[in-house]
Image (tube, coloured by chain):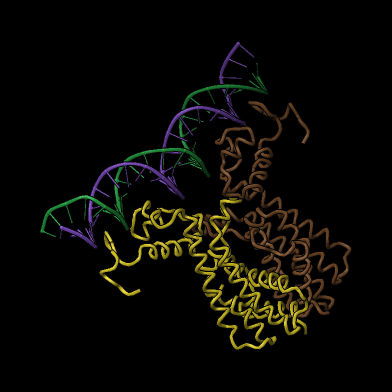
Chain colours: A yellow, B brown, C purple, D green
DNA sequence: CCAACAATCTATCACTGATAACTTATCGTC
DNA sequence: GACGATAAGTTATCAGTGATAGATTGTTGG
């Protein structure tokens, strides 16, 4: 955190100072968001970060690892936001909709991280993928767990239509993700007015998941 | 259709006869389905089709055009499936769920066409994307229009909670898309048993959109 | 039999992600 | 200050990708 000149070497060869790793991630996030992960080359990332292309590999083993890192961070932000929106809330219909709204707002207000976190195409299959995706997967499960805890509160007081918290959680999550991902990926689609659509969508999800 | 030897030259140089274009599409569909579109190389497609890699470009301008062609065909199937599920059906709750089920089944059974049409990342600078995506996109929107027509039937007999067909359609579509796209993009996620989850999701959407 | 022509192949291009080996800048230590 | 040691960056290069150019083959109508 604090610059402690004696402890360790900052080591910033050419122009810039600061953390190379963060500069790389900033460049990667910007390019990934604009053009899509697999339409961005490592040379483009390197140029935007102001270093040579092979220098990337001192900080990330593969290009996918950069996307994975950005994915982990996006999940962490979402988790903390949902946790913050949860404290002190009673399980009421209005608060349920507010919690759903936190998720949608996160996606709509942070389309770039959301895109990287939830809309990345898998590049390979099987065990190699598992290894590559384990950290984003854990971060995603953490966010999902937060979502699940919220749903469990409504189930505990008998407000949910289903007893199965896992099913209800996955169903609601999928319902929210569908709207967010389409609004992000297809902005040119002739959508209804955004605020009205989001409100109607969340109300529909509540009616489908909670007792009247 | 019929082999008409005099009209036009079948011209099958090396081994096989038949339509090269269909052989290529068969090979591409097989590999795309198994490994994902952008994990398959044109050389792999060519080898499975039994021709050299450049020979592909006599039939398709780009590799994406092969995926687009398969995409258009798949959407034609979706549209016809939804149309078939619609004829003779009264607007009942059970039939509503059956119609939505057609959509989900299509997405789950045709992940790559679905991905190309609705989950693709912005790959380049707009116009190139439009050109590349226009045919699959139009085919997808045709399916969407079919979806909207179905919703309108339920609205016409007063079964929908909202009067606005556009809002209801977009909300239901987003809800279905969310589940399909997550099942496709995150197959490794610890989902509930798929059949149960899909059934619960569709029931939730029905409860949220239709009157009891 | 042969010119014409379409289908296919070989050779190659620019570019991709990734690696190896060399170079440089900074450090703690004398 | 001068010294290796080492971290960080570079250039050069690899195999593999999608796509193109031009030579080559095979079939066909005359």
At 33% from the left and 59% from the top, the residue drawn is A50
At 60% from the left and 76% from the top, the residue drawn is A103
Q: Position of residue C17 (x, y in %)?
A: 46, 50
Quarter-of-image position of residue B40: top right
Seen from the viewer's position, the closer of residues D17 and A60 is: A60
Q: Position of residue B35 (x, y in %)?
A: 62, 48
At 68% from the left and 37% from the top, the residue drawn is B23
Point out the image quarter for the C terminus of chain B.
bottom right
Q: Position of residue B7 (x, y in %)?
A: 72, 29
Residue B5, visible in the rendered structure = yes
Quarter-of-image position of residue D30: top right
Point out the image quarter for the N terminus of chain B.
top right
Q: Position of residue B32 (x, y in %)?
A: 63, 47
Numbered marks: total? 0
Residue B163, visible in the rendered structure = no
In the figure, is residue A30 to the left or right of A133? left
Above/below status of B14 relative to A202: above
Seen from the viewer's position, the closer of residues B186 and D22 is: B186
Above/below status of B194 relative to B21: below
Above/below status of A149 relative to A118: below
Above/below status of C12 relative to A41: above
């Amino acid at each position: 955190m604090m610059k402690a000149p004696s402890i360790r070497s900052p080591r910033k060869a050419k122009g810039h100072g600061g953390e190379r790793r963060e500069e790389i991630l900033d460049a990667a996030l910007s390019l990934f968001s604009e053009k899509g992960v697999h339409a961005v080359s490592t040379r483009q990332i390197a140029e935007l970060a102001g270093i040579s292309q092979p220098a990337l590999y001192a900080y990330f083993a593969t290009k996918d690892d950069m996307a994975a890192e950005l994915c982990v961070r996006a999940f962490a932000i979402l988790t903390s936001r949902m946790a913050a929106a949860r404290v002190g809330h009673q399980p009421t219909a209005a608060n349920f909709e507010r919690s759903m709204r936190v998720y949608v707002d996160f996606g709509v207000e942070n389309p770039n991280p959301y895109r990287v976190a939830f809309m990345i195409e898998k590049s390979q299959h099987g065990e190699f993928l598992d290894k590559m995706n384990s950290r984003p997967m854990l971060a995603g499960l953490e966010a999902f767990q937060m979502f699940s805890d919220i749903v469990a509160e409504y189930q505990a007081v008998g407000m949910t239509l289903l007893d199965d918290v896992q099913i209800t959680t996955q169903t609601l999550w999928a319902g929210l993700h569908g709207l967010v991902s389409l609004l992000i990926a297809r902005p040119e689609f002739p959508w209804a007015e955004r605020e009205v659509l989001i409100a109607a969508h969340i109300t529909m999800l509540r009616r489908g998941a909670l007792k009247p």
